[in-house]
Image (cartoon, helix red, strand yellow):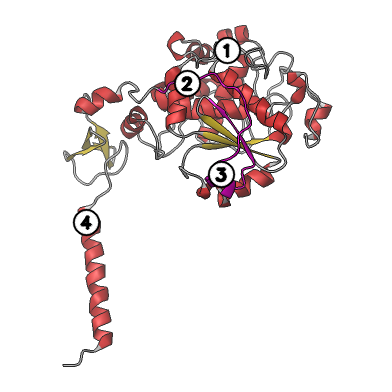
Amino acid sequence: MRRNPTLVVALAAVLVWASAGSLAVAAPKPPKAGAKCPKVGLVQENQGVSFKCVKKGKKLVWKPVKGSGGDFGKRCRAWSEEVFETTPPDFEILTPRQDEKAADIEKVVEVFGIRLMALKGVTDRDLVLSATVLAQWLDNDEDGKPDNRKVQSELQRQHSRMILGVGFNSIGPWHEKKQRLLRYESAPTYGLDVTTINHSRYGLEPSAYSDDWMIEEPLMAPDAATEETLHLVTDVGFAGVYPADFWSAIPGIPEYASRVYRCYLTKQGEDTLKGASRLTKAMDTARGGFFSEIPEQYPAGAWYTRYDECEYSCLAGEYVHWAAITLAGMMEGRVTGIPRDRDGNGDEWGIETAEGLKQRDPQVYKLLTQKEFGFPSRAPDATYGN
């Protein structure tokens, strides 16, 4: 009997639809703290952590069961990944790998297993300068070994790297079109715009492409080399090893996240903002309260008053940067004492010295000076080992 091709296609479509529907039912979303759940008393497991469905107000939500997690939970309470052996960086400019060449990388410097990759136009001097600054954040006493081997190992384990470009009009399109060509496509890849390196901080003449602000007002200008390298170290390294202390509420669990990071975010809820970590709690105090978004006006007495567009996790990353460079003595002479307003006048950050940080923001001071963390306290000067 001759088959009707139209009927065959129609039946196939129904079977595919039914199969897809069955799969959807068979694979519900794994529970996470604060997410909706279907029935009070239901218990399910995710990442080795048990969750119970409870009633909260008028909603049914998942709540982690205290003490759950078994053997995985024990490992989850402390970082337990591989610790890498390292050698002192020599800052040699390397030829890119084949995948890096395909992604338009022209030269590379490697520091403690972290690759700094430069696009067209970046000078050798600025590539090496950025690499030495990163080395000094990781090895603040410059003895040839990372001050916190867990933090360095977490950065290396996640294949962390930096991309240097002349202006964000080169870095942005690169992230969109070229990063996918690299090995470990989804690895943390932080951008550094070399036009905003403040060379005067290192006793150097500006580069030909330096931003006018860096030339005209070198004392007050920020510095991309110290800031962007530190963001990588805190966001990926410190948060990856000590999420309860340093997680900046960046949403989602990255592909290469550590077990302790996965567990912490699973228990807390990946979208948690308020009380996300010791860092964010300290930031909320500095901002005069918890604000999930930029407020119309910060309360009187707040010393961290950013009005520029920035999500909560972005604000937390900037906050730890301000605190770190204050601890390192890099804010002296840069504070006017006038809080910032919505027109951009005044100071976004109101603390000038390490002693001022200790007195006015004791929460973050205690966090950054806790001995076990080995957090850097000296300002990088791009003269590593000299």
Q: Is residue 137 left or right of residue 67?
A: right
Q: Position of residue 349 (x, y in %)?
A: 64, 22
| Residue 25, label in figure | 4
Considering only order in the chain, which callout, 2 or 4, is on the residue closer to the N terminus?
A: 4
Q: Tell me if residue 170 comes above or below residue 151 in the rendering.
A: below
> CA–CA distance between discs 3 and 1?
29 Å
Please tell me which of labels 2 and 3 falls first in the chain: 2
**Is 92 within the magenta?**
yes
- Main structural element of the magenta stretch: helix, strand or loop? loop
3 or 1: mark nearer the eye: 3
Which range of residues does the magenta coloring cover?
Answer: 84-111
On residue 142, the disc is 1
In the picture, the disc for residue 86 is 2
Query: How far apart are the alpha carbons under marks 4 and 2?
Result: 48 Å
Marks 2 and 1, the one that precedes in the sequence: 2
Q: Earlier in the sequence, mark 4 or mark 1?
A: 4
Q: Is residue 168 left or right of residue 88?
A: right
Say whether residue 355 is magenta.
Answer: no
Q: Identify the residue under disc 3.
A: 100
